[in-house]
Image: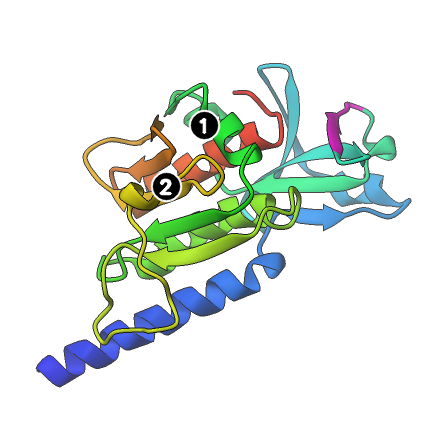
Amino acid sequence: MAKKKKNLSKTGGVIVIILFIGSTLAIGLRSLSDDSPEIIEGKEKIEFEGYTFYYDPIENSYSIFAKIEDNRIEYITDVKDATTRFAFRGDPRNISSINLDEDVVDIILNSNKIYLAYNPNEENLSKIAIAGIEIVRLTGNVFRIPSVEAYTEDADPVDPNVPLKTCEDATELTPIIFLEITDTTEIISEGNCIYVRGKNADELIEASDKLGMNLVGVKI
């Protein structure tokens, strides 16, 4: 039985690493061509807190369109002028109530490197990986901040290729984003450590989406 448990743990770790490596393939970050209006044809239009989202039932995602120039992200209502589509799994109307500390976005965007840490021995590792991807696809692909996967404790079996990081290792230029399942769903900061928390794995993904939206300027 112990051997079987170790094999399962190792398999879970491999899945997580693959998902992190494949973050550029994740739903939600696409450059658009001149025919971008066709992408939203037939989609449900949702107006919420001054932003326009489009719901895609196939991807089960909520998209917002942006124009990016000189690394500035500008949100627009005329989709024909958009250059990029950001899609999120969380319904903006549901995640708006999740608490997010005001300084979290600045901590991330002013950093030189980020460690995204989680407990590799948690259940639902695949969903924790999705929560991480929702953040990394933006910090790494949009803002070009090196974003490195880390464990908060040794995996079983130990993986020497993944660094061990806790909030005690966080610095001003290298903050830690700690993904964890706990009794609250929130995004809070303590010093240079950012806790992204969910009551369960699904709410952890919603919290990651809340953080992601605010990173790109969708302040809901």
* Observer-nearest of 197 and 96: 197
The question of residue 75 being in magenta is answered with yes
Foreground tag (2 vs 1): 2
> What residue is disc 1 on?
104
Decide if residue 123 is on the left or right side of residue 75: left
Residue 186 visible to an observer of this rendering = yes
Give the total of numbered labels.
2
Residue type (three-letter) at the residue carrying disc 1:
Val
Find disc 2 in the rendering and name its residue: 170
Q: Secondary structure at mark 1?
A: helix
Left or right: 83 in relation to 210: right
- The residue at 75%/26% (across/down) is 74
Above or below, 37 against 140 in this view is above
Q: Residue at x 48, y 46 (%)?
A: 114
Indicate the quadrant where residue 216 lies.
top right
Judged from this view, the residue extending furthest toward the right is: 34
In the depicted view, which residue is nearer to us: 111 or 54? Answer: 111
Specify the principal SS of the magenta part.
strand
| Mark 2 vs mark 1, CA separation in Å | 13 Å
Q: Is residue 190 above or below residue 87?
A: above
Which residue lies at the image location 23% right of the left edge and 65% below the top edge? 154
Report the amino acid beneath label 2: Ala
Asked which quadrant contains residue 160, the reply is: bottom left
With respect to residue 51, does 14 lie above or below?
Answer: below
Which residue range is magenta in the image?
72-77
Q: Position of residue 217 (x, y in %)?
A: 62, 25
Residue 133 drawn in magenta: no
Q: Nearer the viewer, residue 8 or 161?
A: 161
**Image color mode:** rainbow
Residue at the far top in the pictured view: 50
Q: Are marks 2 and 1 in contact (CB under 8 Å)?
A: no
Q: Quadrant of the N terminus?
A: bottom left
